[in-house]
Image (spheres, rainbow, N blue to C red):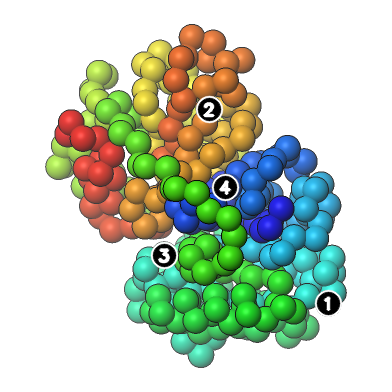
Amino acid sequence: MCILALADDMTGALEVGAKFSAGGIRTLVSAMASPSSSASVLVLDTETRHASPELASQEVRRFVLGSGAVNPRLIYKKTDSTLRGNISAELRALRELYPTWRIGYAPAYPELGRTVKKGVLYVNGVPVAETAYARDPIDPVHTSSVPEILGPSLACTIFDGEADRDLAEVARTILSDSGMRIAAGPAGLAGMIAEQIDLPRGSPAPMPAVRRCLVFNGSLHEQSAIQMQRALGEGCIALEYGSAWRILKCDDQSRGTPAQVANENAKLLLEQIIASEPDAVLVIGGDTTFAVVAALGLPPLLPIGEVVPGVPVTRIENQQLTPLLPRRRRDLLLITKAGGFGGADVLCRVRQRLDHDA
């Protein structure tokens, strides 16, 4: 094991996995604390985005110690691009496990509009605490300052970044420093590390064709609603049964906790996979994505790459699905996106690049 990566939600884990797989590096994504893998990169979803700091710290330790990769060449801690979650607690847990390793943290993701200047995170030029992320119903962001998020006692090198070339330089700095063996940031930094790190590589898998897809939006972010409306208006997706790219209406978001709603929606999606035999499912939102993967039995996930920035495509092998989908005879593709990622036309762009018959 060369790289052990940890993410606090499933969409983030799949983003990081896609970055390394796109570089031809054998990568596996799992939500199991003790997966069996011969991959060069193992990405683990700890599902700690909404946990207490104490539980998040415990889970990070459990996943690292259970991974079988307790002394990897590099640990990559994928963090939310808008500073949500238990970033400080999880980095502290890693620091306690590896007290002699230094941490390099690059919170920027310029390709998706996240930039950092003098330690302040901006989303499309606006301080993150002044955006819709400040009104997140579960994890509101209260400050735009990265040092404030981390706290004064966590030793960590914070890198600014306003362009892709800045992230590329951060990756060079981390990889050339034998003591900085914990890297942290959104998937943008992972992509730069994947480009530069000296690891065995094969040919990246080609992006698959998707003719029939079920589309499911489990995110409450206003941007995902805009994207769905744009795709409906342009005919990229439809509500009618039998449509090639069809929307599934999600359950009432006000009934139960977010986790309960996500689980109910995942059951609905599983029923529709059985009934309509799609090539792929497109799921928006980290909680819903995890619930779908859990409903499928937490199978090993094989990332392929990003169809557009921030939208990874992942393969689930047919034999892993046999217990739940005994009649299915082909792999299932999983297309995922965090709720706030992408422009208004992102769903149409995804379909245009995957559905060659559209």
Q: Nearer the viewer, mark 1 or mark 4?
A: 4
**Disc number at residue 30?**
none
Q: Which one is earlier in the sequence, the residue at label 3 or at label 1?
A: 1
Above or below: residue 10 compared with residue 93: above
Label 2 CA crowd tier, 10 Å (few <14, some 14–19, many 20+) = some
Q: CA distance from mark 3 to mark 2?
A: 37 Å
- At horizontal 37% and vertical 26% (from top left) the residue drawn is 279
Question: Which comes before the other along the chain, label 1 or label 4?
Answer: 4
C-alpha separation, residue under disc 3 versus residue under disc 4: 36 Å
Badge number at residue 100: 1
Residue 317 circle label: 2
Q: Residue at x 27, y 28 (%)?
A: 211
Q: Are marks 3 and 2 in contact (CB under 8 Å)?
A: no
Quadrant hosting residue 282: top left
Give the camera-side residue of 22 and 152: 22
Q: Which residue: 81% across, 56% down? A: 70
47 to the left or right of 212 = right
Give the camera-side residue of 134 and 26: 26
Query: Which badge, 3 or 4, is on the more N-terminal residue?
Result: 4
Provide residue 89's location: percent of width, then percent of height: 74, 67
Q: Which residue is mark 3?
A: 132
Dot 1 surroundings within 10 Å: few (below 14), some, or many (20 or more)?
few
Amino acid type for the residue under numbered disc 2: Glu
C-alpha span from label 1 to label 4: 28 Å
The kind of residue on which mark 1 rests is Thr
